[in-house]
Amino acid sequence: MILKNDDFKLDVTSEIGDLRVLLIHSPDSGLGKVVPSKAQDWLFEDIVHLDTMRREEYDHYIKLLLYFLDPEKIRGRLNELNDPANDRSFFKPDHPDFHSSGKVIEIQTLLSDILEQPDIRKKLVASVCAIESCTYRLQLQLIDTDPVELAKIFISGSLNDDEMIFAPIPNMIFSRDIGIAINNHMLLNKPAKKARARETMLVKYIFFNHPLFAPYREHILEIPETVQHFLRPGEEDEEKTTLEGGDVMMVSPQHLIIGCSERTSVSGANEAIKLLFEHNVVNKVTIVKIPHKRDYMHIDTVFTQVKRNVWVLLRSLAIAEPAQPEDEPIAFFADKKSKDKPEIVQFTKGHKPKVFDSLEDLLNDISQNDLKSKEPTQFIYSGNNVFPFDAREQWTDSCNLLAVKEGVVLGYDRNDKTVEAFRQKGFTVIKVTELLQKFENGDLEPQTLTDTLILMPSAELSRARGGFHCMSMPLMRAKVIN
């Protein structure tokens, strides 16, 4: 059965408009097979306990999304789904009782849909087997596999949940990184690490072959490689053309931010700008170049948007470097210190580039000029800007929040000082389990919620170094401004 949504249209013009449709991937069995010796290669900081991650953490995320986006799928079933004896079939994409929402869309469902087509199945099996160096006999076996099971195999790397035939792709839970919707276009990204090659290819096949995206096939953009890219050095070459979705933010209808980071190269940003301007997708792109450190990884680990005039961010990277007195020796070495500060350059079609002195200046400009905020811009700082909590909580994604509507954001419950900072700015703070019960009882409605930080359990999810901004690929949002 092919997933459908008759109301769907690819349309994302901001980071904060009411979320209508998004693409996610629930933790699959591959995450439970990450071994310590390969964790770093597979881009994980630690191994996770899969059942805890699913039942006590990610399942709450799915329930919450459904209440906001597709309440008919969940309302009246919360107590049943919360029962510890429940077999979780509602959350399993390969199970007949899966929720199959057309608004909270599971990547694995779309993949199994396109694998129903024999020609696509043969091509994709051949492609995966080429990447993973499979035997020819295994390739033939996979071609004859049921599409639902084959989708599961492609993602988990395992036959029958037991026999691993190639590596898992545990980073697929971070769906933001493999594509980004920009207005009514889709930009398919180029990951920096080999560990993400298979998931990128799977998503490429989905967008070019699933009926849901058929009206937008001409609007799917792929970043090309530079000429003679094959002559460059190895995977860690800084000139490699890479771009990941955690470094891309659609902040207003004509303005995109691209971060240059550990995972997105200047070459990747340059190719993206040329592509976007050539196709008239946006007319303004700002490059934010942050230090190439694992601490930051993407720009959405440093800042995300909460409201038209409110941002959460790491202040140590956001402020301009104060000038040093000329009579002090450190003044002669200030240029070295400034290399740990973001470089921010804005490119607008038909205009000269504009340089911003600090991240706060840029975000204030977006709030006031792009989004026409009538209120002063406010910043909520990681760790409430108190050392060492600012750095500790940034590491566990205090700045990586997902807005389900303007002013209503999801974040981890472990970042206590950041939570305190939200309270000080007048936000209501509520645990997801309490909020879900209020939705189920009719005590609250998602549509009436304002200025709220929803706390999500995070003991296992935070080990993977990604927050809810990473774990979402918005495909449709309501407009904030026209």
Image (tube, rainbow, N blue to C red):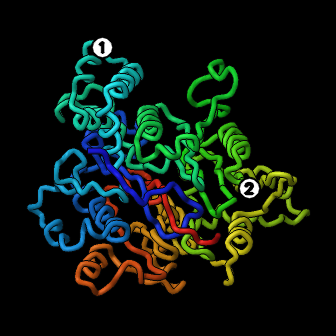
Residue 278 in which image quadrant: top right
Amino acid type, label 2 = Lys
Q: Is residue 208 left or right of residue 444?
A: right
Q: Residue 177 at what x, y percent from top left?
A: 50, 47
Disc nearer the start of the sequence (1/2): 1
Number of residues whose C-alpha sits closer than 10 Å to that of mark 2, classed few (under 14), some (14–19) or many (20 or more): many
CA–CA distance between discs 1 and 2? 48 Å
Q: How far from the left and from the top, in percent, is residue 153?
A: 26, 33
Q: Is residue 93 above or below residue 377?
A: above
Q: Residue furthest top?
A: 136
* Quadrant holding the C terminus: bottom right
Residue 70, relative to residue 275: is it above or below? below
Depth check: give the residue in front, 114 or 18.
114
The label shown at residue 284 is: 2
Question: Regarding mark 2 in the picture, which secondary structure is present there?
Answer: strand
| Vertical placement of residue 390 versus 451, above or below | above
Residue 340 in the image: above or below residue 204: below
The residue drawn where x is 37% and y is 59% is 103
Q: Residue at x 90, y 63 (%)?
A: 326
Residue at image x 17%, y 65%?
Answer: 81
Relative depth, front residue between 398 and 221: 221
Q: Is residue 326 left or right of residue 454?
A: right
In the rendered image, the quadrant that contains the N terminus is top left
* Mark 1 burial class by Cα count in 10 Å: few <14, some 14-19, many 20+: few
Q: Which residue is mark 1?
A: 135
Could you tell me residue 418's position as x and y percent? 49, 73
> Can the viewer see residue 23 in this picture?
yes
Taking 307 as reference, is 203 left or right? Answer: left
- Amino acid type shown at disc 1: Thr
Determine the residue positioned at 27% across, 69% down: 72
